[in-house]
Image (cartoon, coloured by chain):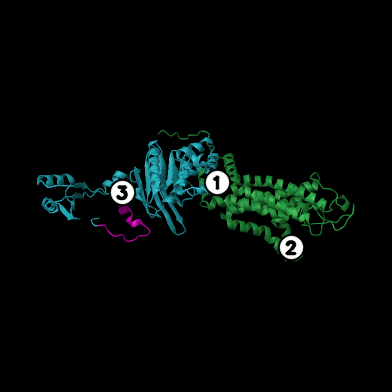
């Protein structure tokens, strides 16, 4: 027999290898670039539209309104987030729809390692692009708002990324996008079907927002607090307003991580038990 | 010689359907083992079970003495082509092989090497979605060869290939076995495996029908009929019937003789000074052997018009 038992002595299929393989997979399909472009583009576009069309309705130095100009400049993320969800869903469901998942699991039968590596790579990329997006939204939004009278003269002192609250809101928006990707990947791994997974993710994100309009205050408030988007984007609030979502930084983060962890833990549990 | 794949009492059910039923066989190194059975016999299921993709309800599969899930670098132990279309259509062939290489810490230069090996050197930059079936099969084989594994599984690799592709893959399978590798090739057509397989594992309805070498299978079917073509049909018939043969006329100048071997027929005809244009012993084909073996095991049977003399 001329073939050595292991032709490549260094060969192994471990965690680092799974991470590197998933990174190659993510960066070698066009849908990744389109999704990330949409995440940034739609977010910035909506921030521009929303902030570009607002005005102060009066105000003077020291006597501004209660507009949350940090939140307003980050509102585009509410629209761009769908692209992050779709990217994360496709990262796993496209493997099932093309049956490539069998090649993946034949190359590395440690399925939980593979799924965790995929989650790490996808969430990492969404966090990075999400942060760039929210910084861009903030800068574009602040610039447009200043031009629309949200400046010192109108009672709105200039806000920069060096301000603690603004910094928290910008980073928090990126963390929310990463968490949404985490949750979406988990749902994709459970559903193993693109349309089904996207439907579940969109319903989870949007249904509470729609339902809140029809519910009495005593039901609407907890629903908003414990909804994925409500809890996740409450971090954008920097001004006390009556319509604020009453959940703090730690609470919001806990809720968002709970959604992602629940989906991914279920996916990890299922992936070893189901036939590929 | 080490056992490359050992299947022991393997059983797999999907709901109420028993896809694989107490199946046991061995695949040895250095030869091509054909894995044949009618459609729905359980070939693909067995291959998925070998690769640990599906979990068996009973039994086990050992690959070079270990369970698939315990292999440290699976691509260096077993290469598999399950489904040529199972690539992301938007990913370039080279990138598809690169993520596979990374997953087992194989050197990136292997990507170019296996692309050359399967004749896709130039097409490596193209997206897999634009590949013809033949090119997709080649890409799947390149993926299987990435870790230079001693054991190879190919599920229906000849399906849908053009004649040039078929010739190429037959030569490749032979050369892989000649290098000492164990090669398991499935097919629902025995004729596809004629001339490539050294050994056959025949299954039907998920059960093992037989595991035998090709020559064993053929000799068990040989029934010793002799075909004769002669311009003097009547005279030859008389002579052969007189010598104890059972002779049937199958055309204006052709006869089929049983009960006499070809040497005896030739001698009898020569003694009388009669002319022969053709004389040959009928050889059972693998296809006939296969159809006989699996007759009771096919899922869907259609009536086939019987050939005269068959």
Q: Are marks 1 and 3 on the same chain?
A: yes
Tell me which numbered mark, 1 or 3, is placed earlier along the sequence. 1
B236 to the left or right of A58: left
For marks 1 and 3, give the CA distance: 41 Å
Q: What residue is drawn where x is 53% and y is 49%?
A: B89
A125 to the left or right of B262: right
Query: Which mark's residue is nearer the viewer, 2 or 3?
Result: 3
For marks 1 and 2, give the CA distance: 45 Å
The quarter of the displayed image where residue A234 is located: bottom right
The 10 Å Cα crowd at callout 3, few under 14, some 14 to 19, many 20 or more, is: many
**Residue B288 covered by magenta stretch:** yes
Subunit of mark 1? B
- Identify the hue of chain A: green
Residue B208: x and y in percent read: 36, 51
Residue A171 visible from this viewpoint: no
Query: Which mark's residue is nearer the viewer, 1 or 3?
Result: 1
- Give the labeled residue for mark 1: B91
In front: B58, or A92? A92
Query: Which mark's residue is nearer the viewer, 1 or 2?
Result: 1
Q: Are marks 2 and 3 on the same chain?
A: no
Residue A42: x and y in percent read: 69, 53
The 10 Å Cα crowd at callout 2, few under 14, some 14 to 19, many 20 or more, is: some
A44 to the left or right of B153: right
- Identify the hue of chain B: cyan
Question: The N terminus of chain A appears in which quarter of the rendering?
Answer: top left
- Give the labeled residue for mark 2: A220
Label pair 1/3, CB-CB below 8 angstroms = no
Question: SS at mark 3?
Answer: helix
- Give the labeled residue for mark 3: B286
């Amino acid at each position: 027999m001329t073939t050595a038992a292991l032709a490549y002595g260094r060969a192994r299929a471990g965690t680092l290898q799974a991470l590197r393989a998933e990174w190659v997979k993510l960066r070698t399909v066009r849908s990744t670039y389109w999704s990330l472009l949409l995440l940034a583009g739609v977010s910035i576009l909506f921030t521009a539209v929303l902030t570009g069309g607002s005005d102060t309705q009066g105000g003077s130095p020291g006597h501004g309104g209660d507009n949350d100009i940090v939140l307003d400049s980050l509102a585009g993320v509410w629209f761009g987030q769908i692209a992050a969800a779709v990217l994360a869903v496709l990262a796993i469901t496209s493997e099932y729809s093309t049956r490539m998942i069998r090649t993946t699991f034949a190359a590395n039968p440690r399925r939980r390692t593979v799924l965790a590596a995929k989650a790490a790579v996808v969430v990492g990329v969404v966090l990075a692009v999400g942060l760039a997006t929210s910084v861009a939204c903030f800068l574009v939004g602040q610039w447009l708002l200043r031009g629309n009278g949200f400046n010192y003269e109108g009672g709105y002192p200039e806000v920069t990324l060096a301000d603690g609250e603004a910094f928290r809101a910008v980073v928090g928006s990126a963390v929310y996008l990463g968490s949404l990707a985490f949750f979406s990947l988990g749902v994709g791994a459970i559903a193993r079907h693109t349309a089904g997974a996207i439907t579940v993710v969109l319903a989870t994100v949007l249904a509470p927002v729609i339902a809140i309009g029809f519910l009495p205050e005593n039901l609407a408030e907890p629903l908003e607090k414990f909804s994925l988007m409500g809890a996740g984007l409450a971090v954008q609030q920097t001004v006390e307003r009556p319509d604020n979502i009453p959940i703090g930084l730690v609470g919001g983060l806990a809720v968002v991580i709970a959604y992602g962890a629940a989906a991914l833990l279920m996916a990890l549990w299922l992936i070893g038990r189901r036939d590929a | 010689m080490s056992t490359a794949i050992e299947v022991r009492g393997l059983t797999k059910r999907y709901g109420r359907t028993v896809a694989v039923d107490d199946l046991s066989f061995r695949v040895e190194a250095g030869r091509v083992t054909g894995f044949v059975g009618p459609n729905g016999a359980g070939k693909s299921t067995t291959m998925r079970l070998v690769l640990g993709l599906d979990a068996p309800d009973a039994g086990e599969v050992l690959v070079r003495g270990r369970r698939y899930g315990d292999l440290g670098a699976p691509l260096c132990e077993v290469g598999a082509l399950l489904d040529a279309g199972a690539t992301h259509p938007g990913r370039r062939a080279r990138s598809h092989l690169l993520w596979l290489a990374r997953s087992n810490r194989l050197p990136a230069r292997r990507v170019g090497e296996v692309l050359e090996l399967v004749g896709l050197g130039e097409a490596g930059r193209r997206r897999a979605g634009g590949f013809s079936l033949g090119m997709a099969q080649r890409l799947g084989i390149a993926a299987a060869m990435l870790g230079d594994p001693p054991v190879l599984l190919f599920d229906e690799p000849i399906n849908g290939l053009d004649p040039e592709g078929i010739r190429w893959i037959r030569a490749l399978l032979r050369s892989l076995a000649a290098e000492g590798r164990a090669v398991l090739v499935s097919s629902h057509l025995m004729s596809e495996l004629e001339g490539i397989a050294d050994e056959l594992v025949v299954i039907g309805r998920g059960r093992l029908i037989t595991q035998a070498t090709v020559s064993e299978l053929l000799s068990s079917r040989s029934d010793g009929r002799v075909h004769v073509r002669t311009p003097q049909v009547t005279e030859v018939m008389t002579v052969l019937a007189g010598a104890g043969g059972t002779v049937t006329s199958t055309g204006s100048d052709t006869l089929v003789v049983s009960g006499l071997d070809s040497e005896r027929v030739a001698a009898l005809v020569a003694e009388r000074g009669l002319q022969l244009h053709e004389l040959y012993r009928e050889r059972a084909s693998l296809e006939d052997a296969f159809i006989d073996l699996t007759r009771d095991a096919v899922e869907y049977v259609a009536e086939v018009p019987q050939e005269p003399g068959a």
